[in-house]
Amino acid sequence: MRAFVPLAVAVLLLAACGKAEDAAVGVASGGAVQKDGDKTTISTEQGDVVLNAEEGQSLPSRFPKDVYLPEDYVVRSSMDMQGALMVDLVAPGSTKDAFAAAGKWMPEQNWTQTAMIQQGGQSVLVFEKERQLVQYSFFEDEADQVHVTVQLTEKGPD
């Protein structure tokens, strides 16, 4: 599974740049590629990876209800695979306000903050709960708009 995650992220980045061809993605991932507009599904022995680059899409159906998202967000892209979810979104507001809101809201949902970094215009928060890990990356996107990346992963065996 650990080797599969970097591969999926690399495929997502290549697809986002518009440089990946179906055949190359299929060979690199060892799976079959199906495209439906901005949505790409890569089927492998480890499971499916669903990449969606449609701006304004809904959250993946299994996105947890107890994970903070800023108000009035718009999802720009998502990745859904066994053991991991990632959403990339923008929302009105500032990095400072979104960072503070997530830092307050997540503990109220019984998440434990395990890391916090603020440096060079980017802020990162990490939370854990049971066997799940959530990492937020916040940075200014445009004037009065915050860019937020939320990565959810299942923690491996201790």
Image: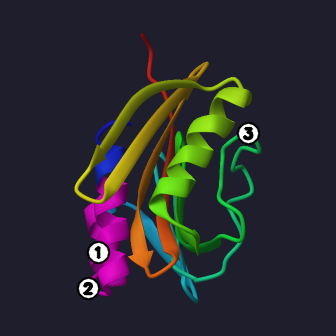
User: In this rendering, which labeled residue sits more in front, label 1 or label 3?
Assistant: 3
Q: Which residue is mark 1?
A: 14
Q: x, y percentage for residue 91?
A: 59, 71
Please tell me which residue is depicted at 37% across the width and 57% down the height of the picture: 8
Please tell me which residue is depicted at 56% across the width and 38% down the height of the picture: 103
Image side of residue 136 versus residue 80, left or right: left
What is the CA distance from the residue labelled 1 to the residue labelled 2? 6 Å
Quadrant where the C terminus is found in the figure: top left
Q: What amino acid type is highlighted by mark number 1?
A: Leu
Q: Quadrant of residue 30?
A: bottom left
Please tell me which residue is depicted at 67% across the width and 43% down the height of the picture: 67
First to last magenta residue range: 7-28
Q: Which mark is residue 131?
A: none
Q: Which residue is mark 3?
A: 66
Between 38 and 139, the one nearer to me in the picture: 139
Q: Which residue is mark 2?
A: 19
Dot 3 crowding, Cα within 10 Å, few <14, some 14–19, many 20+? few
Q: x, y percentage for residue 68?
A: 66, 47
Between 24 and 127, the one nearer to me in the picture: 127
Image side of residue 38 versus residue 124, left or right: right
Image side of residue 73 versus residue 149, left or right: right
Q: What amino acid type is highlighted by mark number 3?
A: Asp
What is the CA distance from the residue labelled 1 to the residue labelled 3? 31 Å
Q: Residue furthest left?
A: 120
